[in-house]
Image (tube, grey):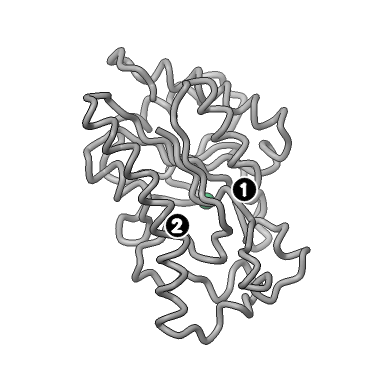
Amino acid sequence: MIFCDHASREIPAELHDLGLPASELARHIAWDIGAAGVAEALADIFDAPAILSPVSRLVVDCNRQLNAPDLIPERSDGTAIPGNLNLTPEDRALRVERWFEPYHAAVESIFLERERRGIASIALSIHSMTNNMAGNHRPWQISFSSHDDRRLVEPMIEILRRSNDIEVGDNQPYSMDPAVDFSTPFHAVRRNLPYLQVEFRQDEVADAAGQLRWAQRFARALTEAVSTGEAVQ
Ligand SMILES: [Zn+2]
């Protein structure tokens, strides 16, 4: 089961681009560039369900706990978000109701249906990361964010590092924090499902060819990492 919290850069029309120019809305602050294509390619390869958030994380960040200060960010990577300033509690509640809850309800409904039918699931949380943050180049082409349960992430990292041709981040640049991250803790950790929360570097997955290449490499490694013989869905 695949979910992609930051798949889209869409800003609903009534939010008037959150007061940002198109140049800002094309940047990584609005979405995870390339992540939707990787998620869709993985869904094809594994014939697995995938749910992609249809709005920008600047509208509401679907991977934040509801009490996180950056659930509706006022700034992101140096850019102020005018349309997110001075929101009332009602404004905030409406964002959650309209764009956070339906996305997570869709993900939840798939997990519930699979549980009901007795189908084992692996949770894949697909993200991408910018190659430069605050002037620092990121050396990792792919990174995994994990917490206590590392049953899938450890074999994945070992397999991907074996060929010595890429840098693989292990809780770098991001770890997973159940007090801050929402999607993987809520949908996977709560169910004790094996999970991978992965960041592909954006320059690697900027076009369809790169998205497919990385989805295929990731899928080969995951197939090997899942040694129990259960289907990867
Ligand atoms: Zn993301």
Q: Quadrant of residue 202?
A: top right
Q: Disc 2 or 1, which lies upstream in sequence?
A: 2
Tag of residue 138 = 1
* Above or below: residue 154 compared with residue 226: below
Determine whether, in the image, residue 224 is placed left or right of residue 179: right
Residues at marks 2 and 1, CA–CA distance in whole angstroms? 24 Å
Instruction: Give x and y (percent) for residue 213.
Output: 65, 24
Tag of residue 163 = none
Within 10 Å of disc 1 (Cα), the crowding (few <14, some 14-19, many 20+) is some
Instruction: Give x and y (percent) for residue 31.
Output: 61, 54
Q: Quadrant of the N terminus?
A: top left
Residue in the image at 68% along x and 70% along y: 17
Residue in the image at 37% along x and 50% along y: 183
Q: Quadrant of residue 170?
A: top left
Reading the image, the residue beneath label 2 is 62
- Amino acid type at image mark 2: Cys
